[in-house]
Image (tube, coloured by chain):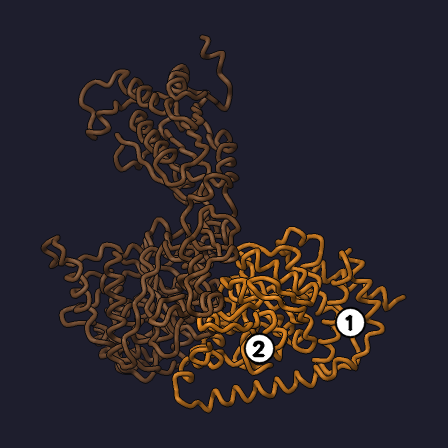
Chain colours: A brown, B orange
Amino acid sequence: MNQVLDRFLRLVRCLAAAPRLHGVLFVDLDPLLLTAAGRWLADCAQAGGGGRPPVVTLGSWHTDDDLWSSVKFTASGLATGPGLIVETGSEPAPVFLVPDLSTASLAVRRAVVTTAGADTASSQRHGFSAVWQPRARWLAACHREALANLPAHLLDRFPIRCEAGGIVNPDRVSLDAADDEYELAWLGRLLGPPPLTGSPVFTAEALDRIIELTGPAPGMRRDIAFGRLSRALAACHGADTVSVSDVDAGAALLGVVPDAAPERVPDPLTQALEPEPEPAREIPDRRSRTEDMALVDGMEAEPVPLRSGGVPETLGRLEHAGPATAELFPEDRGDALSEPMALREWWHRHAGSHAARGQIIGSQRTKSLRDLAVLPTLLEAAKFRAVRSGGAGGLVIQPSDLRRHRRRPEPAAALVLVLDHSCHRGWDWAPALASYLRWAYTARAVVSLVEFGYRSAPEPLRADRYRARDLLDPRVVASLNREPGSASPLAHAIDLAADELRHLLRRRRSPVREALLLVVTDARGNVPFLDSTRGAVATVVGSRGVADANEAAKAVGQLRGVRAVVLTPDLAPYPHLAFDLAEALGGRVTSPVPFADQRRK
Amino acid sequence: MTIADPDHSILPFSLIVGQQELQTALQISYVDPGVGVLATGGRGTAKSTTIRSFSRMAYSSLPVTLPIGATEDRVLGGLSVEALLRGEHYRQPGLLEQASESEGRMLYIDEVNLLDDHLVNIILDAASTGVLEVQHDHVDQPSVPVKFALVGSMNPDEGGLRPQLLDRFGLVVTVKPDNDATYRRQVLENVLRFDEEFAKPTSPYLDEQRAMDERTARRLKEARDRRATVRVDWALHACARVAAEFELAGHRGEIMLLRAARALAAVQDSDVINESHILTAAQFALVHRRHSAESGTLVAWSDDDQGRVHQVLDEMDKG
């Protein structure tokens, strides 16, 4: 049994066993498996009586109007009612799935913050009013690279997190249309029958152990969630009490280990299979409990690698197995760079003609017909239909009914940053870059980064490209601090940058109005474009790398609305190359130290 | 619509561990209902749990809560949509009126710094004028007096409050995480025990906790009844001098300081305001009214600030 899959299955079963364990965030999980887990949780609830709970997928398209209240057509006309997020007393608690927390809409994120794990929640929208005790389970997933960019406030609602990348069905044999159902059934079989539920009582030693393992942490949510997880594990094997071994099993499940006393924390699963006396604590029936943790026949509990030491102060004594797992709580790092105020309604990035092109996030009252939201307008008028027409006439729309779309503000500016790490020797590019980066930050510019020529490049003959929502994406900081390498596929990089600019200026629903192309290079490209595409240098390069870069740059020069700048080190031995490149780009050259004199030479 | 009796899912107030400053501020707010409280602090510090638990203990119900996604019609009141769809029309009171008419006269806003700007404007208007006049959405509502205390909680990671809104909170408490192991263990034990007991059909343990809450509520009610008899003559001058020392704009600062000190004296069964009452109240009433807080970012109350209050009071003693 794959260790990642084993943890994933156990956590999902714990969710079924412990109603107060409100959710788990899975990193790099295949969304299909999230669906399968949600369905299985619904099956478990149904098997326990009380009906089958709804399984609701929440994503980037949901608005406040979808989540908190609803207006539905009924046989007798229209009726107001609860939205997707509102729990009613008559129905079992829903299971919410968020396949990608990083792309979930602002409305979904705010809903998570205000309801997940909360003791009460309230909806007050469009005449609908409800107060309820949230009992829903939240299953969310997120890509690892996006995790650090999520607001700490949102991440805090998921104190239980689990690495879940690379879970695959080894028996998967075809790619036909039935595959999805096949996968769902496969995971359902692995999860097995509903677990035992109950509310075992904590022993004093178990409570001590939780505090010992977690140590100082921001707030109490993790301690409490850890306790509830331990209780779920105890409940799964029908215990009346939660013992130290259950806590240790929970720790292993989360990859948690204390740094101070590794000798006291042997692998709990391995230890349980070969029990040793532990005179200081009474751990009844340890072997049978751990055996019960095996989820289905044939599944073996694999030991979780534990390690100790080297824990940063901010993490307290909470550490996770392996460097990858340690990144599950990026918000604890002192240098965490999550998006500031990411849960607030955005400031307007720009106004004017672009304002009607952003993603729709709701509706609002209007006095004009511009960008009219037809359905909300009709629904507003429908509310008054009976009153206005005496119940018999058609729909009468009055000016006060008009609603227009509320749209997510789109970025008006873009920075395409091309970093040639091979020229980053003997000079500090940070001061020279600072003014451009400051502009990108203040303009809330979307950032595309193209980089090459660094030592750890996965494919040195090619440039890499990625898009970041803004400058605070932690990948940008990482890119600015790479070790220089030797290959310089400048032509490939310029080609990628041109493609990015075309995308930003033409293809997007809301094209940017201002784009800055900043190329940091000495312009000594030594990999011809074709060699980059092939991934191998075929013959003697000569000046083909430089020539190809200039050729690719001409495509940028033809784009309107692009400001191109070549930032070149004053140490460059062939300064004219930078000027040639800038000329092809239709831009200019800048350098930390002007070297016009060198050019004249 | 109220579902699944959320009142009962709240941790009894007697099980709240620590949070002494927030508890004190909430007690002051209960004894003098015109004094609102803002609890600001990092994630997972039980700010909202403490406020809800206090409300349930003191008023036997949850506070009227304004969620961050509320629409204007529910805040101000408007025609009942359900009735309209049936062909009838009558006005449904909004949350501001509900809060004004509730026993606690408290309007609670969780995550107040995430509240949409237009809702903030509505609240500021109603709170500053004490009158609600609605003429929109086919509603022609005569002026209705609204009187409520704003109680809010927020995580400053998501940004601060506009100074105008911040000023509407009588007291501000910065809730800090306590990393003491004994404290953490007690919190953990109480919460997990509550989980266990809550799952049972009946729980003598929870009955006992709720009985303790009732005793606390009785004690606070007695303090509220006593408040008007607390003598303020000396404290009147002291609060004015403290306000002058901190160069507060306007007079809301010293008024809040005096009201908070008087309520605190009542809670502590004192018939006169003494120095310790002013010293305790000053950190809550002035922390957000100093010049350093004009940006909306809250600067923590320091030992130096406390020393300045001390010095003013000492000079008064000598004078």
Q: Is residue B259 left or right of residue B193?
A: right
Q: Position of residue A516 (x, y in %)?
A: 44, 30
Residue A158 disc label: none
Residue highlighted by disc 1? B275
When asked about the image quadrant of residue A253, the answer is: bottom left
**Gap in Å between the C-alphas at discs 1 and 2?**
27 Å
The local crowd at label 1, few if under 14, some if 14 to 19, many if 20 or more residues have their Cα within 10 Å, is some
Question: Which of the chains bears the disc numbered 1?
Answer: B
Residue highlighted by disc 2? B54
Numbered disc 2: secondary structure: helix
Residue at image x 57%, y 77%? Answer: B54
Residue at image x 28%, y 20%? Answer: A548
When asked about the image quadrant of residue B103, the answer is: bottom right
Q: Is residue A330 left or right of residue A1?
A: right
Question: Which of the marked residues, 1 or 2, is nearer the chain's N terminus?
Answer: 2
Q: Is residue A213 visible?
A: no
Measured along the vertical axis of the image, is residue A413 above or below residue A63?
A: above
Question: Which of the chains bears the disc numbered 2?
Answer: B
Q: Is residue A469 visible?
A: yes
Counting labels gives 2
Question: Which quadrant, please, contains the C terminus of chain B?
Answer: bottom right
Q: Is residue A307 left or right of residue B114?
A: left
Q: Position of residue A338 (x, y in %)?
A: 45, 50
Residue at image x 51%, y 55%? Answer: A399
In the image, what residue type sits under mark 1?
Glu
Numbered disc 1: secondary structure: helix
In the image, what residue type sits under mark 2?
Phe
Image marks 1 and 2: residues in contact by CB distance under 8 Å: no
When asked about the image quadrant of residue A279, the answer is: bottom left
Q: Residue A435 or A250: which is nearer the viewer?
A: A435
Q: Position of residue A483 (x, y in %)?
A: 37, 34
